[in-house]
Amino acid sequence: MKKTIVAAGVFFLSYAAVAQTGPAELMAGDKYIHYQHSLAQFFSTESPTGWQHIATLIKRYDKAGGKAKLADELMNQVYITAQLSRVFSVKGGLFYTNTGGFKPSAGIQVFIHKKNWRLLLSPRADIAKKASYELFTMAEFTPAVAAETKLYIRLQAMSNAGAQHNRSYQLLRLGIERKGIQYGAGITTDEYGTNGIVHVNTGVFIRKLF
């Protein structure tokens, strides 16, 4: 248990140290430790092209799931991006999971950012004969509640399918934001396989904006 927390913490801090722009989040739940980040940067201040790195790490506790214990999960996505407008981008690169290996991937991204809310839609697909298709969505709401404090609410979901359903999740984060750091309570619902077997993870999170 202690080794799991230390390893996840080191993973979080190592990426935070080299982050360019984007959020990194660590959640300690009752079923697993969950780390995720989405970092991006333009190649120059005048360039519409850049790079993006998205990562997720799920480290399950030793006794999680009993005999039906689920495996740990690692996902990495690395893309070259091109911004076509203020809200619309295209990207291409590599998608990796510890169960499926490396696959070329292409996608689009729609990002709308207003005063205290943000909406992101990002579908993508493998470039392969036996491709999987994925839709990622996120909505954030951060209204001010005091001079230096905001309420933080985030809904996030992902669904991945090929010939059949592979993996999906829905998560809710509820807390506060102070000086670019968000923290509070969270819940994640995970579904696996054709039968959509459901697993729920609840806990506390901390999220840093870079």
Image: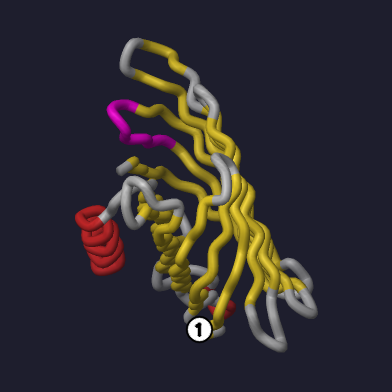
- Residue located 40% across and 68% down the image: 59
Element on which disc 1 rests: strand
Magenta span dominant secondary structure: strand
Identify the amino acid type marked 1: Phe
Q: In the image shown, does 102 or 59 lie closer to the viewer? A: 102
Residue 19 placement (x, y as % from top left): 28, 54
Q: Is residue 199 above or below residue 94?
A: above
Q: Quadrant of the N terminus?
A: bottom left
Magenta span of residues: 178-184
- Residue located 48% across and 81% down the image: 98
Q: Is residue 183 magenta?
A: yes
Q: Quadrant of the C terminus?
A: top left
Which colouring convention does the figure follow?
Answer: secondary structure
Q: Which residue is mark 1?
A: 102
Give the quarter of the image for residue 32: bottom left
* Residue 53 located left or right of residue 138: left
Q: How many marks?
A: 1
Question: Can residue 189 be seen from the camera position used here?
Answer: no
Q: In the image shown, does 4 or 81 lie closer to the viewer? A: 81
* Residue 135 located left or right of residue 25: right
Residue 141 placement (x, y as % from top left): 54, 29
Give the quarter of the image for residue 6: bottom left
Question: Can residue 150 be seen from the camera position used here?
Answer: yes
Instruction: Count neighbours of disc 1 (C-alpha within 10 A) and say few if under 14, some if 14 to 19, many if 20 or more.
Output: some
As drawn, the residue found furthest toward the bottom would be 129
Residue 126 placement (x, y as % from top left): 63, 77
